[in-house]
Amino acid sequence: MTNKISRRKLLAGAVTTALAAGSMTEAPAQAPQQKGTKLPDVWGEDFLYQWSPPANVKRDLTPGRSPLRLSHIQMTSAEGTDYGALFKGMRDGGWTACEVGSAQWLSRKLRDSEVREIKTQLKAHDVNFYGIHCAGNIIAPDPEAEQWQRHIIEAVRSADEMGCQLILTHVGSMYANRNTPHPQNWSKEAWTRSVNALKRICKDTAGSKVEIAIEPVNSEAINNPWAQVRLREDVGDPRIMSGLDITNMVHPAVAFRMTEFTNLVFDLLQDQIAYIHAKDFVWNGMMAGLNWSMNATGNMDYETFLVRISRLKRPTNVLVEFLTTDDEYHQAQTNMRAVAEKVGVKIL
């Protein structure tokens, strides 16, 4: 009899022996693991730092069949919005998907006629309104944690009404401000608070098909792909997904090994990925500070990145963010479409 290996045991180490041999692409699903959650050693275990990439990293740039939809312009629930004009403007600009911030979206209850109008105009212009983004902090000190959990439950119910695929949120920080790293954010207490909060949210929205995508951020407990896999298992609900942002997990040890890191992330998370943020970064200073850069101009391997997205089983919405002007967003889209065309990835 063949023993089945649980996914948690499978992912307890960093990467497969096949990855350690040099290629980070398409690792066997049940190969033995190295110890520790890191990229494989390049120069041997006795070498202090492994921050430089190995020579001749193999790249499999065979595209998949799933098309990408790019998102940038936010939805709104503002009174009097001309949704036909809004979605036409998105589509004319090459943006075929959109999301909305929960604070603005939930600030008023939409009339049934407005909901119907939004759905009609989305269909007419072939724009996908896929999700509600909750900048939440479900492990904040009470009573803020309770307030955020109820806010996210309300967002799930609103997403259900609109036919959205997901809500995006965070586990947050043990400080009231989720953007401030608390020294105990990676403690067992913070992990337990995160799991229990998500169990409560899933229980209170039972029966919903809306996915709960957790965005990884270095300042929070969910700051690596192994934590995303473990979180879903500990919560015990298949609706817990990844709102993947690879750049949010970058640290100096992987800053120049992004082909390997990108493949590792996709190999681990696979179809737990619900949608994706697209950014880029550079490390060009003395200290370990990373700066945002124009898409497809920095350290990210955009060819591998877009190819791996296209291999996911379902079409994926990709949010371009953290730029400033419309011209910058237009340039980012132009860059991404050029890379996609080069490697044979379809962007709608």
Image (cartoon, helix red, strand yellow):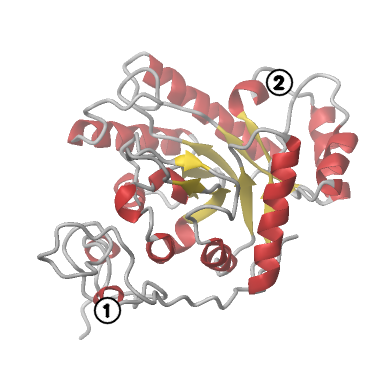
Foreground of the two, 68 or 283: 283
Give residue 284's mark.
none
**Quarter residue 269 falls in:** bottom left
Residue farthest to the left, as pictured: 46
Image coords of residue 147 (percent x, y): 44, 18
Please tell me which residue lies in front, 297 or 81.
297
Q: Earlier in the sequence, mark 2 or mark 1?
A: 1
Question: In this figure, which residue is indicated by the disc labeled 1?
Answer: 21
Asked where in the image residue 303 lies, by quadrant, the reply is bottom right
Q: Give the residue type at disc 2.
A: Lys
User: Which kind of residue does numbered mark 1 sit on?
Assistant: Ala
Residue at x-position 45% and y-position 51% = 246
Neighbours of disc 1 within 10 Å: few (<14), some (14-19), many (20+): few
Which residue is at a point 46% across and 57% down the rendered structure image?
A: 272
Q: Secondary structure under badge 2?
A: loop
Q: What residue sits right under mark 2 in the picture? A: 109
Front in this rendered view, residue 160 or 84: 84
- The label nearer to you, 2 versus 1, is 1
